[in-house]
């Protein structure tokens, strides 16, 4: 399966299975909203966006949406929008979509451990979205944490033929934050910065 971007009347591949992607931007620029049609089109294997589409999705796989920061009401609204965009009935939608709510889980280290536990049964997932990367790391500027986190995501993708996209804030000069942001960006086959 690959993620494709439309330019004119042609779709071009921008990410393939086994690859990591990064979508970054200032807070409230629309990173999370941009991913809603990506998730919906993966779930229903149809083009629900005028810009993106998935090709070759295994209908037996699910999306895992990992959220580290949204309050329950905002996250529930996002899930409802994804469901509407997917066009699927409740049961079919729930068969293709899992959400891991981590906003109310203690430390960022504890959130990362819960995330790692969730993906142990990775075979059922084809696409993982982690929103927001900084919620899974104690310090975005720690070289040690950056190496551990980046290597974990890279191995998760390449060892399982899985597409993973992480969202991140940017610094004032629109570059990914800290060693972790830059490390993930270096390993990413897709890196979009929203301005």
Image (cartoon, rainbow, N blue to C red):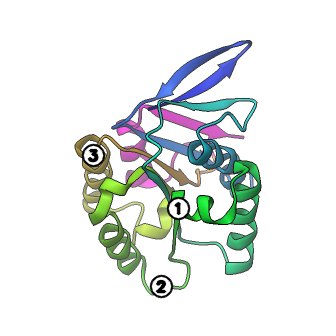
As rendered, which of 146 and 87 lies closer to the eye? 87
In the displayed structure image, the side of residue 83 where residue 189 appears, left or right: left
Mark 3 vs mark 2, foreground winner is 3
Quadrant the N terminus occupies: top left
Whether residue 138 is in magenta: the answer is: no
The spot of residue 117 in percent (x, y) is 30, 72
Using the image, tell me which numbered label, if any, was put on residue 173: none
- Few, some or many residues within 10 Å of mark 3 (<14, 14–19, 20+): some
Q: CA distance from mark 1 to mark 2?
A: 25 Å
In this picture, which residue range is highlighted in magenta?
173-195
**How busy is the neighbourhood of tag 2: few (under 14 within 10 Å), some, or many (20 plus)?**
some
Q: x, y percentage for residue 48?
A: 72, 38
Mark 1 neighbour density, 10 Å: few (under 14) some (14–19) many (20 or more):
few
Q: Residue at x 61, y 44 (%)?
A: 44
Please state which of the two labelled residues, at mark 3 or mark 1, is closer to the viewer: 1
Earlier sequence position, callout 3 versus callout 1: 1
Task: Tell me the SS state at disc 1.
Answer: helix
Front-lying residue, 60 or 10: 60
Could you tell me which residue is drawn at 50 percent across and 53 percent down?
177
Element type where label 3 sits in the image? helix
Query: Which numbered marker is on residue 105?
Result: 2
Quadrant of the rendered structure where residue 47 is?
top right
Q: Is residue 163 above or below residue 93?
A: above
Q: Which residue is mark 3?
A: 160
């Amino acid at each position: 399966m690959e993620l494709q971007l439309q330019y004119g009347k042609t779709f071009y591949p921008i990410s393939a299975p086994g690859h990591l992607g990064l979508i970054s931007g200032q807070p409230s620029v629309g990173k999370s909203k941009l991913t809603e049609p990506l998730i919906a089109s993966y779930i229903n294997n149809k083009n629900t966006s005028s810009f993106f589409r998935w090709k070759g999705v295994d209908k037996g796989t699910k999306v895992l949406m990992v959220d580290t920061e949204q309050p329950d009401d905002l996250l529930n609204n996002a899930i409802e929008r994804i469901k509407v965009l997917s066009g699927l009935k409740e049961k079919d939608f729930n068969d293709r979509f899992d959400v891991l709510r981590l906003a109310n889980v203690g430390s960022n280290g504890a959130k990362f451990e819960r995330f790692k536990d969730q993906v142990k049964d990775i075979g059922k997932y084809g696409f993982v979205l982690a929103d927001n990367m900084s919620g899974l790391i104690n310090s975005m500027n720690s070289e040690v944490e950056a190496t551990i986190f980046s290597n974990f995501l890279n191995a998760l993708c390449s060892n399982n033929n899985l597409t993973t996209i992480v969202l991140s804030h940017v610094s004032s000069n629109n570059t990914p934050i800290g060693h972790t942001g830059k490390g993930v960006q270096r390993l990413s086959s897709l890196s979009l910065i929203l301005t």
